[in-house]
Image (cartoon, grey):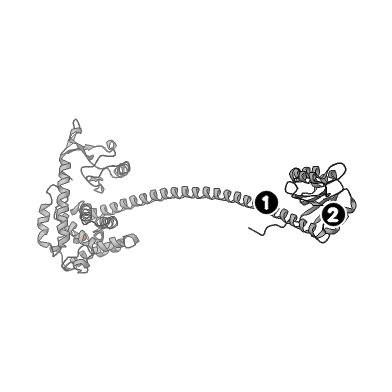
Amino acid sequence: MGTPVTVKAKVLLVDDEENILRSLRRLLADEEYEVLTATGGEEGLRIMTKEPDIGLILSDQRMPGMSGVDFLEKAGAIAPDTLRILLTGYADINATIDAINRGGASRYIAKPWNDNELILIIRDAIQKYRLIKENQLLKELTEKQNQELKKWSAKLGLAVQQQTVDLEKQNVELTRLHERLSRNMKAMIAALSSLIELRDVTVLNHSNNVAYASVALARGLGLDAVTVESIEIAAHLHDIGKIGVPDIVLLKNKDEMTEAELEEYRMHPVRGQAAIHFVEEFNEVGLFIRHHHEWYDGRGFPEGLSGSAIPLGSRILAVANSFDRLSGRVGGPDGPDVALGKMAPLVGKQFDPQLFHVFKKTVREIASTMSASENDAAEVELGIKDLLPGLAVSRDVRSGTGLLLLRRNTTLGAESIGLMKKCLLLDPSKTGIFVWHKRTEVRGSKAADQGSG
Ligand SMILES: [Fe+2]
């Protein structure tokens, strides 16, 4: 708030005797007031209506026409803040009382007055008037500023509300975008994973099975969601480096390979890492892929790392990879025990003993839940047009040329049905889509044999 405004006050002198007006003027000549004079009440009121800032009226009581008290009363109606003083003769006690009660006078002065005393009284009155006016101005200013503040705070409130709404919208949009990106990424990974399988037809669905078993083991170990996701992606893509290995090498067993072919084969984890190296988010995934053929005792490749020097994700992949190669697919018809039995002698050599222990438990739990739920359901073959969201496919869904479109036991959604329709239109399959139906719902449908895929 700035310095209070100084109000230059005006003094109005009212007396029918010109010589009194003159002597009062003289008295005030050295003061910084604007002095106005009137020779009667009527003239005084006219001046009052024209001059807004009269701080003090000094009025005689005895005047022809209008008395001083009547004049002060009317002047008070025009300017209530103006201070009023009545000049009275010595015997005019009634007029004095009236002046105070009715005329709103702050005091009276008896004639003849003492000049020094009168000037002090006038200064004092003007000072009071100034204070009243300054207070009023400050009050108005404060009021105005308060109004302004209220307006601003209302505007600010609206702006904040608008921003909150905008941010919420942006958040929804970002979440949608993120979900879309993540869906696209998963679709890309699935597509890459299918390509690997087309390259190495001896191991149909291998990447998916390794991913399934790796995720189960990672969760069994209590790893966080981000790491589990990296492991899942690494599992899908772990053999992506085989795309560069010549057919002649790929189709051989390892013990039939020449030294040069073995060397070529052993490059696939490094090539796999290099292949996804350009995706920054996949740095950890790449590391898991690079070391998925390391052995716990250090006799693996490409680096010959051992023990905990091998990334945990790679050790998990190694267990899941061998498990599937040994035909022990989780939930598969043979159950897991055959593969686990074949792996047992290599625990502590190829596999991390601690991981193997957890894996055994996890795999058996999953296998028993799966067989229980599958005993409860039967397979039905449906045309692509008859698929409904919520149904789960009972066999892998592949395109006519063998590209994996959906994994067994995946529950259908509107989106996956749409994608499948598109793919099958380009590359039609010879069979329908096999889905699970609860046994009680199968009556009348064409039930297919159970347990394939
Ligand atoms: Fe491999």
| Residue 279 shows in the view | no
Q: Which image quarter has ligand 1? A: bottom left
Locate the C terminus and report the quarter of the image it occupies.
top left
Where in the figure is residue 146, as x and y percent of width and height? 60, 50
Q: Residues within 10 Å of mark 1 (few under 14, many from 20)?
A: few
- Of residues 187 and 14, the one nearer the viewer is 14
| Residue 124 shows in the view | yes
* Vertical position of residue 41 compared to residue 322: above or below: above
Chain-order first, disc 2 or disc 1: 2
Q: Residue at x 33, y 43 (%)?
A: 415
Please, which residue is most extreme toward the front here?
91
Residue highlighted by disc 1:
136
Amino acid beneath label 2: Pro
* Relative horizontal placement of residue 139, taking residue 183 as reference (left or right): right
* Vertical position of residue 256 compared to residue 418: above or below: below
Amino acid beneath label 1: Gln
Q: Quadrant of residue 64?
A: top right
Where in the figure is residue 240, as x and y percent of width and height? 26, 58
Please, which residue is most extreme toward the top here?
444
Locate the N terminus and report the quarter of the image it occupies.
bottom right
* Relative horizontal placement of residue 252, taking residue 70 as reference (left or right): left
Q: Residue at x 86, y 58 (%)?
A: 26
Where in the figure is residue 390, as x and y percent of width and height? 27, 39
Disc 2 from disc 1: Cα separation:
35 Å
Q: Residues within 10 Å of mark 2 (few under 14, many from 20)?
A: few
Residue highlighted by disc 2:
112
- Of residues 205 and 18, the one nearer the viewer is 18
* Circle 2 SS class: loop
* Circle 1 SS class: helix
